[in-house]
Amino acid sequence: MLAWQVETPGPIATGPLRRVTRDVPVPGPGELLVRVTACAVCRTDLHVAEGDLEPHLRPVVPGHEVVGRVVEAAPGAEGFAPGDRVGVAWLRHTCGTCDFCRRGSENLCLSSRYTGWDADGGYAEHAVAPAAYAYHLPDGYPDAELAPLLCAGIIGYRALRRAELPAGGRLGIYGFGASAHLTAQIALAEGARVHVMTRAEPARQLALALGASSASGAYDRPPEPLDAAILFAPVGDLVPPALAALDRGGTLAVAGIHLSDIPALNYQEHLFQERTLRSVTANTRADGRAFLDFAARHRLAVTTTPYPLDEADRALADLAADRVDGAAVLMP
Ligand SMILES: [Zn+2]
Ligand SMILES: [Zn+2]
C-alpha cells in the first residue's frame, strides 16, 4: 500500500515526510484493520514531522484523524463488524490501572500511547487500531468532514470545557484553524458570544461567517472583556495578551500539545483577580463520545481542503504556511 512516513524529523522545507510502499498491516488481538477513506492533517502531525515532539517510533506513519471502513475485526475487537464506518483518533492506549486512569483522567495516563506517534497512523491506504479506542461516527456527514472532528473537534471540545465558559458568556478564540472553527460553533450553539483573534484575513472572514461577534488581528484586544479564552495558535507570545483580555475570574486554556515559550508575565496585568491559565492534554474517550454525540445533534459546518493521499507532503507544507482553509484532509 501507499503510505507516508517520518524517518528523520526536520524542518518541513527539508521534506521529513517520505512516500513509501508498505505491506498492509495485520491487526493484532483486539484490533481493527481499517481501509482509510479520509485522514485529516493536524498541527500535531507537523510537530511529529519537524521533531517538536520527540520521535516515539521510527519510522512512523503520521495521522490521527482517520475515517475508514472496517475490513477485518481481529479476535477480541468488540463493537465493530466488517463494513462499519469507524473513526480512529489520537488516544490509542491507556493502562486503566494508574491513579489517573482510575480517577477518570485517562488523558493523563502514565502509559498512554498515541496514533501517528507511538504507532502508525492514517497517512496510508490502511491502518490498524484498537477497537476499544475507535469511535462510531454520526450519520449525516461525508467522510472528509468527519475526519477533522476526530482531533480538531474532540480537542476543541475538551478545551472549551477546560476554559469553563459560563452559560451565555464571552469567549475569546486565539488562532482560527481547524479546531477553532469547530469549537466556535459549539460555543455559539451553546449561547456564547465569540470573539476571534487571528492573523489570516480568510480565517477572520470564516469566523464572522460562522457567527463570531468580532474578528481581529492576533494581538488585538477584543471589544469586550472575556469570561474565557482558548489559545489554539502554538504561540506563547499570545499568552500575555490573552490573559490581559480576560475579565475577573476568567480562564485561558491552551489547547495545543506544543507551545513556544511564554514570555514573562506581570502578576497584576495578567493573573491577579483570580484569572487562571491552564493547559489541555489530549482527551478521554468520554470526551470523544460526548463531542461526537454533540456533532450528531448539531450539524457542524466543517470547512475542509481535500488533498490526494499522494500529496500529503504538500498538505503538511501548506498547513505549516497557513495556506489551508479549515482542515486539510487526505483522500486515499
Ligand atoms: Zn493509566
Ligand atoms: Zn491532532
Image (spheres, helix red, strand yellow):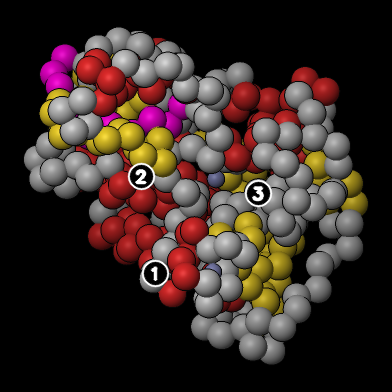
The residue lying at 47 percent from left, 49 percent from top is: 281
| Quadrant where the image shows the N terminus | bottom right
Residue 289 position, x and y percent, is 38, 65
- Mark number, residue 67: none
Q: Which residue is mark 2?
A: 159
The residue lying at 29 percent from left, 58 percent from top is: 294
Count the labels in the image: 3
Residue 282 visible here: yes
Q: Which residue is mark 3?
A: 63
223 to 272, vertically: above or below: above
Report if the CB atoms under discs 1 and 3 are less than 8 Å apart. no
- Residue 64 is left or right of residue 332, and the answer is left
Q: Which residues are magenta?
A: 223-233
Q: Which residue is mark 1?
A: 104
Three-letter code for the amino acid on which mark 3 is drawn: Gly
254 to 321, vertically: above or below: below
- Residue 66 part of the magenta-drawn span: no
Report if the CB atoms under discs 2 and 1 are less than 8 Å apart. no
Three-letter code for the amino acid on which mark 2 is drawn: Ala
Q: Quadrant of ligand 1?
A: bottom right
